[in-house]
Amino acid sequence: MKTTDFDSFRKMASGFSPTTVTRFLATQGWTLEHRIEGIKEIWSSPTGSEGSEPEWVMIPFATDYVDFDRRFSESLAAVSQIFDCSAEELSRKISSFDTDVLSVRLSGRAMGDTVSLAEGEQVIHGVNLLLKNFTYAAVAGHVRHGRGRMPNRVSEFMQSNVRLGQTRRGSFIITFTVLLDEPDRPSTPKSHAPDHYDEFDEQLPLARRMMMMLARAVCLANASAYGGTGHGTAGTPNGEFHEELAGMVLETIGKFQNLNDLKEIDFSFSWASALPAPTVEQSFFSFQLEDLKEFHPQMEGVRPKTLPLPGPEHIALAREEKVPEVISTAHRGEAQETIISGRVTTLERSYDGGVVTIVVDDSRPPLNVRFRLPESGYKLAVQAHLMNTSIVVGGHLGSSGRVIELENAVLDVKETEGRLRALS
């Protein structure tokens, strides 16, 4: 083998672990023949169609040995010869085994179907934020509102497992690869894994749960925009949760409507072969940005000026972007029912609770709102302040002089406790 060819296997060896390679071999019908724990494993290839003898390969596991890199590179070279493929092709095969892929295709309006670099940067930023929020939903079990601190697990996952991948064929396709978390990767081949599961199955890797949530939300958002056949959620146990996630997708895409060059954005999903593909109706979804203005006029800034206030047992979540509309009404002295989200800035204790001041999330300029909470709600507000996370509260928003007040305030206990648990 030429030195240049072997260098490609050295480079490949630095990107995969021995465990990843052996799990890939298991899905290809290879057999584990012998193992010395932590040192090496011997694998044999399947018998050929013409009855040819299986070929054996040693995969080293002793990463502290001085010759580990060389031996692992040689093992990968041997595997590539058996598969009759190059290092690059083998790398793609192994990557597709343990990586879910989201491809985002951008289509421009003119100039040879190009999109400016600045607009491409905004799309990458928007999709990155979308993936981060969906990871939060998979970890915490609810949709994120406001700008509270992300749990460490979310930040670490985004840093380690979500990557930009190799460019796919097509005009301006951005590939986001989501690596199945190493400790959670299945130890059995796909054929022995369950053939039906959902994104709430805690036994699934976080990466697969997040990507399933995203795929279902994009499917529902597309069906909502174009009257398609996406999975209906009305009456289902997690229907409201899925609808909120779909709204997050539409909100992200809606922000792209301000881009001058971008005409269309497509999302497509492909799934790691280490697990059975999820039961999503389709894997490709296209959004024409001009069409969305017709179907969703709220994307152009038309937002309701009031929000309903549910009973005190649980306040439904609302996006903080809707708050400034009702704030202007409050300044005119007209009390309005609304739901707001914000971080606690001031606490004033009294014998039966206390007065809380929050700064409304994403308000420009920063807007402070005061309200009184009973003992139990005040204690939760104190915890939220100590952990630097937002709370959600509903009531009648009005003004008293230069002070914005929320009368008859009711804290969303379930949401606040969920945020605190996610940060603990």
Image: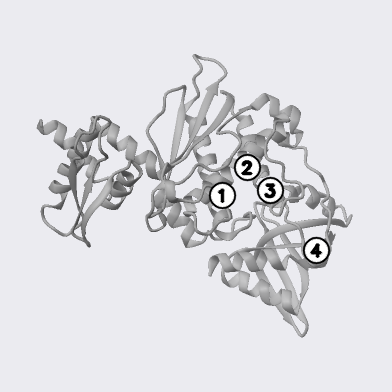
Expressed as whole percent of the image width and height from the top left, the position of residue 363 reads 68, 52
**What's the residue at 47%, 61% (across, down)?**
152
Query: How much space separates mark 3 and mark 1, taking CA atoms?
Result: 11 Å
Expressed as whole percent of the image width and height from the top left, the position of residue 89 reads 29, 31
The residue pinned by badge 3 equals 244
Which corner quadrant of the image does residue 200 belong to?
Answer: bottom right
Query: How much space separates mark 4 and mark 3, taking CA atoms?
Result: 28 Å
Query: How much space separates mark 1 and mark 4, taking CA atoms?
Result: 33 Å
| Amino acid residing under circle 1 | Phe
Q: Earlier in the sequence, mark 1 or mark 4?
A: 1
**What's the residue at 54%, 66% (across, down)?**
423
The mark lying in front, picked from 4 and 3, is 3
Which element type, helix, strand or loop, lies under badge 4? strand
**What's the residue at 57%, 51% (across, down)?**
199
Q: Earlier in the sequence, mark 4 or mark 2?
A: 2
Q: Which mark is residue 405?
A: 4
